[in-house]
Image (cartoon, helix red, strand yellow):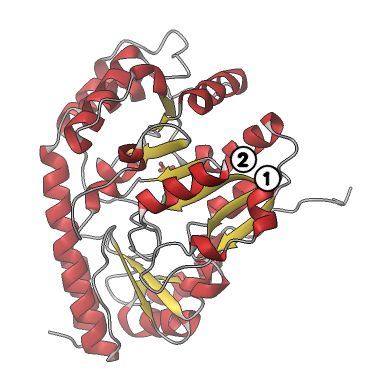
Amino acid sequence: MSSEGFVPPPYPYDRLDRLAQICATHPGGIVDLSIGTPCDPPPAAVLTALATSDSERGYPPSIGTPGLRGAIRHWIDRRFGLDVPVTQIAACVGTKEFVATTPQYLRLRTPSRDTVLYPAVAYPTYEMGATLAGCRGVPVPALPSGGLDLDAIDAEDIDRALMLWVNSPSNPTGALTDLDAAAAWGRRHGVPVFSDECYVEFTWDGRPRTVLETGLDGVVAVHSLSKRSNLAGLRVGFYAGDAELVDYLKDVRKHVGMLVPGPAQAAGVAALEDDAHVELQRDRYLRRLEQMAHTISAWSGLTVTLPAGGFYLWFDAQDGWEFAERLAREGGALVSPGDFYGAGGANNVRIAVVQPEHLLLRVAERLGVN
Ligand SMILES: Cc1ncc(COP(=O)(O)O)c(C=O)c1O
């Protein structure tokens, strides 16, 4: 029977198959810099905890074990100097599902509102979450500095807004958002601000910031171990902030059966308790960003600047698809055309530095760059 309603669009990265085939014709094969999936090892203690937690038999708590929530609280304290009550912290199964499902839960709670606000050039799941909730997704334009132009939001959209997403450091742009301004805007207008901070450990300009520094009321910070600890395969994330919102989401998500597996929760504790591997990872990404920015600008003549945060290079190539194809042909490197992140990104390209240096060097050699 044909569908009258929603048909999922092609998954952005599935649209890269043709370019991936071009890359694969190079001797030595493809160097995949498209998806932001970590390639470096997580700490050994994480793998030990994963194998020895003895937590496979019973159902794990949806909100997270006391151990995991305690480790999250401790990390927030170490990283940001904030004491967040453990009752205002809960686990999610990685953050993509949280981003994709939260709008529908907020809509059920406040049926009179139907709008999700999100950055115009952004991780595509913000818009998808609005769509899956049957909501209007309304993109918020960027300021020239890269943050959000909150003054550009229409009064009617504000009245109808269930939530505002901010993402700092941003995927794909690497820009930092003024979280004080976003939180103040949300409180002024009675719109909850959800701050996706999964790249916060890779903040290059200034110190790492969380929206929770502005106070907990009306805001929810969303974090992931995927990028911080090279654990995208583990599926451990968390959210923390406004007591009422966190309580509501805890309750509804328990009914849905959103459970981080017990062994993954135990491994998450081990990851959160260690900062040394994050320092190492910061050095790796920074080195790779510098290396790749040099390669691309030397080869193409384009201006490629380092991001304020995150592990993506994001630059104007005039036509993202055309540039991605040229790089696939000449360098065997697969990158993401900017329209994956919104129509406003169509001129751009995103390069994820998620391959080891020797493979980045291989791309440089193919392109004839020293
Ligand atoms: C901005 C942003 N938010 C959330 C996620 C989801 O990460 P995970 O589901 O692995 O926690 C990603 C992954 O690339 C991302 O870039």
**In the image, farthest residue toward the bottom:** 301
Asked if 366 appears above or below 280 in the picture, the reply is below
Work out which quarter of the rendered image holds the C terminus and state it.
Answer: bottom left
Report if residue 367 is visible in the image: no
Percent position of residue 193, x then y: 49, 43
Asked if disc 2 is less than 8 Å from ligand 1, the answer is no
Asked if 341 appears above or below 68 in the picture, the reply is below
Q: Residue at x 34, y 18 (%)?
A: 86
* Left or right, 132 with reference to 329: right
Q: Residue at x 33, y 42 (%)?
A: 226
* Left or right, 100 with reference to 318: right
Q: Which residue is mark 1?
A: 132
Q: Which residue is mark 2?
A: 103
Percent position of residue 232, x then y: 36, 42
Asked if disc 1 is less than 8 Å from ligand 1, the answer is no
Q: Tell me the quarter of the picture where residue 236 sits.
A: top left
Q: Which residue is nearer to you in this view: 13 or 97?
A: 97
Question: What amino acid is labelled 1 in the image?
Answer: Leu
